[in-house]
Amino acid sequence: MRVSTGVCLLLLLQVTAVCCNGGVTSTYVRKPYASLDMPIHHFPSPPGFNAPEQVHITQGDHEGRSMIISWVTPLHRSPNVVRYWEAKGNFNNHHKAHAKTTSYRYYNYTSGYIHHATIRRLKHDTEYIYELGKHKHTRRFSFTTPPKVGPDVPYTFGVIGDLGQTYDSNQTFEHYVANPKSQAMLFVGDLSYADDHPFHDSNRWDSWGRFVEKSTAYQPWIWTAGNHELDLAPEIGEITPFKPYLHRYNVPHKASKSTSPLWYSIKRASAYIIVLSSYSAYGKYTPQYNWLKEELPKVNRAETPWLIVLLHSPWYNSNNYHYMEGESMRVMFESWFVKHKVDLVFAGHVHSYERSKRISNVKYNITNGLSTPVSDASAPVYITIGDGGNIEGIADNFTEPQPSYSAFREASFGHAILELKNRTHAYYTWHRNQENEAVAADSTWFYNRYWYPHDEEHSSTPMD
């Protein structure tokens, strides 16, 4: 979209930035008042008796030839079948997949019937139509499978964290949906914020599923669990962690030999994506530790050059909110990330935006005193993007001065787009809510750590 010179000048007058010991701290000031949840009646069930709702899809295997279709029927267990066919074909050539169906109780709430059906042996880079329900209550959706895995396969991901279901959440979500580039979503945790309501009101899980359906039913969202997925409330008798989340959101963890759906990996186009759980045990000898130790050496950078990690609690965060909460996981795993040349780490949790330089802090031991992050060409860029717009509001209390490892930070809501171009280059943009979708508040080229480990210092172009 073309932007007039006058609009650009106005933005430059309105938004300035402070350069300090680190990179850029934007002085953009978003609206000061808190985010408010949209009323639950804004998200009605679709019309029709027992009509399928809260439809969402995610990759169903390790390679991208399967899709997990999930949905809820509020009143009856059936129908629990998905019908699907190639978009270029017709319904007469359709196939069927039967779902596994579950439900749960949480305090005084009883869920509807939650269905998960895995469609297998799909063709790469092909559009499919799928149907749920029956008779006049049938609902029809579509998705496109990823291209075959390969080192120079271009692919575009959206990135959002800590979305919630406020009016600000809606602005973030609508901006993302309006962006035509993204083919799949990397979601870094904290979905519904049901636990911010009395008795962890699980009706807010239902409303969130309806809220995001117009994206989640059509493109896969790669799920990460955050602290708001724990739903641990012993004061009301709820002592099973992640109960609503694990019932509602299936992932292909067994395909990557994981013992838990809270940590797993997939390949997609030219990316190898590892999802970790900040709120599951990760100390030495734990299942997550053992899995990651075996997983990282499996990555073949000749096949999937882009190694991306999703987790919730950031390892590098210069905001006073949640400061150093990810430190123990960083101490456990950062040296592995450097050794295996992880390209990017996306996190949420902190309700603002921050992008780091390529740095590490792995030389420290108890006697040498080397405890300061330093520039490291083998290290990832760490991006905190917990700025989806949730009910808890913006985190607007950055530490001063800005640390040397911080490249750009801003206390605003928004979303990001990551465009993998080939094995060496990726283009990344972060869009704050208050701007036109075509104008990025932060953008940079990323150079692949395995194939093109050059300095990116001058490739970033923050609008501020």
Image (cartoon, rainbow, N blue to C red):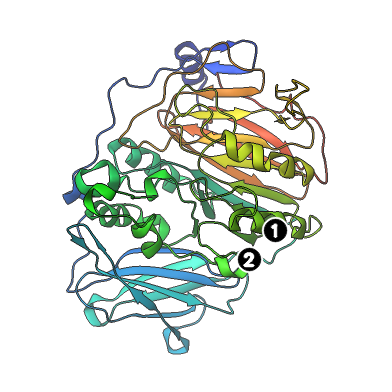
Q: In the depicted view, which residue is nearer to us: 163 or 461?
A: 163
Q: Sequence-wise, which precedes: disc 1 or disc 2? A: 2
Query: Horizontally, is 286 left or right of 192 in the view?
Result: right
Query: Horizontally, is 322 left or right of 79 in the view?
Result: right
> Where residue 19 sits: x, y (%)?
61, 11
Which residue lies at the image location 50% right of the left edge and 81% below the top edge? 89
Query: Horizontally, is 453 left or right of 419 in the view?
Result: right
Which residue lies at the image location 39% right of the left edge and 42% below the top edge? 163
Crowding near the residue tagged with mark 1, few <14, some 14–19, many ≥20 C-alpha atoms within 10 Å:
some
Label 2's element? helix
Find residue 382 and report its image quarter.
top right
Mark 1 vs mark 2, CA separation in Å: 8 Å
Residue 55 visible to the viewer: yes
Crowding near the residue tagged with mark 2, few <14, some 14–19, many ≥20 C-alpha atoms within 10 Å:
some
Decide: marks 1, 2 in contact (CB < 8 A)? yes
Find residue 301 and report its image quarter.
bottom right
> Where residue 303 sits: x, y (%)?
77, 60
Amino acid type indicated by mark 2: Ser
Label 1's element? helix
Residue 1 visible to the viewer: no
Which residue lies at the image location 33% right of the left edge and 50% below the top edge? 231
Q: Where does label 1 land, which residue?
A: 295
Q: Is residue 405 above or below residue 19?
A: below
Q: Is residue 53 above or below residue 356?
A: below
Disc assigned to residue 256:
2
> Where residue 22 sits: x, y (%)?
64, 16
Which residue occupies the extreme front position in the image? 367
Which residue lies at the image location 70% right of the left edge and 58% below the top edge? 295
